[in-house]
């Protein structure tokens, strides 16, 4: 079992109609994202489950740091895909790609803000992170406002607690990065499940 921490601002990605893409377009997008990840020295592909050769897979991708024209070229500038890409860049969101049971490949908006990292850890480490933040470590599902996360991360007692445990200290950069996220709209919070 694991616990996934992420920034949630309440945005419903299904407000924008996803587009169907073909396997060749998916491969072109993956090539572009891998090439640009190296050039920009940042991870643009965020795996969720499976790989593009599996019957079922899903992953998200950061497209905000890229030119819209270069990304839409992977899809022959198809209007349905351009609508999703424009909305992702306008709202500062990732795109999400998925296929279920060897059917159509879909491209839609992700529920995650573009620059917000996610952190997936074991249940034991998740409980330790929650306790480190002064929260109930037995809560497997929950959320706190990002303002509260910022306040807790700047608390000297919590900072000492983090510094004294080297394993927890490795999660601090991710938590600080999550705390810095400023979504376009909504009331952002750190959610875990």
Image (spheres, rainbow, N blue to C red):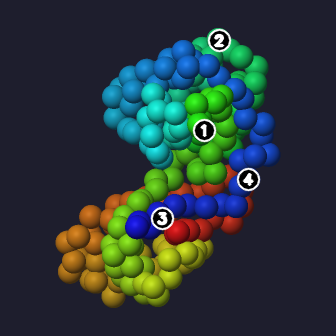
Q: Earlier in the sequence, mark 1 or mark 2?
A: 2
Q: Check contact, mark 1 vs mark 2: CB within 8 A.
A: no
Label 1, label 3: how many angstroms apart (C-alpha)? 24 Å
Q: Earlier in the sequence, mark 3 or mark 4?
A: 3
Whole-percent x and y of residue 71? 57, 22
- Image point (59%, 37%), residue name: 101
Label 3, label 4: how many angstroms apart (C-alpha)? 18 Å
Badge 1, how many Cα within 10 Å: few under 14, some, many 20+?
few
Residue 132 lies left or right of residue 181; in this view the side is left
Label 4, label 2: how many angstroms apart (C-alpha)? 27 Å
The residue mark sitting in front, 4 or 1, is 1
Residue that mark 4 sits on? 12
Residue that mark 1 sits on? 100
Residue 173 lies left or right of residue 27; in this view the side is left
Q: Does dot 3 land on a helix, a strand or a loop? A: strand
Label 1, label 2: how many angstroms apart (C-alpha)? 24 Å
Badge 4, how many Cα within 10 Å: few under 14, some, many 20+?
few
Q: Does dot 1 land on a helix, a strand or a loop? A: loop
Residue that mark 3 sits on? 5
Q: Establish if 157 lies above or below 92.
A: below
- Image point (33%, 88%), residue name: 157
Q: Earlier in the sequence, mark 4 or mark 2?
A: 4
Q: Which mark is residue 76?
A: 2
The residue mark sitting in front, 1 or 2, is 1
Whole-percent x and y of residue 162? 28, 77
Q: Which mark is residue 116?
A: none
| Observer able to see residue 65 | no
């Amino acid at each position: 079992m694991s616990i996934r921490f992420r920034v949630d601002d309440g945005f419903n990605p299904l407000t924008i109609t996803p587009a169907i893409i073909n396997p060749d377009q998916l491969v072109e997008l993956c090539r572009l994202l891998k090439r640009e990840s190296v050039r920009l020295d940042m991870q643009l592909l965020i795996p969720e489950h499976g790989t593009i050769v599996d019957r079922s897979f899903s992953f998200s991708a950061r497209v905000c740091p890229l030119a819209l024209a270069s990304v839409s070229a992977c899809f022959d500038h198809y209007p349905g895909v351009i609508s999703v890409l424009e909305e992702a860049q306008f709202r500062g969101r990732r795109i999400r790609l998925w296929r279920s049971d060897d059917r159509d490949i879909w491209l839609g908006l992700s529920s995650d803000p573009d620059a917000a990292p996610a952190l997936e850890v074991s249940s034991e480490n998740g409980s330790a992170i929650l306790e480190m933040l002064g929260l109930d470590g037995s809560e497997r599902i929950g959320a706190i406002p990002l303002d509260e996360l910022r306040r807790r991360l700047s608390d000297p007692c919590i900072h000492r607690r983090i510094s004294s445990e080297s394993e927890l200290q490795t999660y601090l950069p991710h938590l600080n990065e999550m705390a810095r996220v400023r979504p376009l709209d909504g009331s952002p919070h750190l959610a875990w499940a």
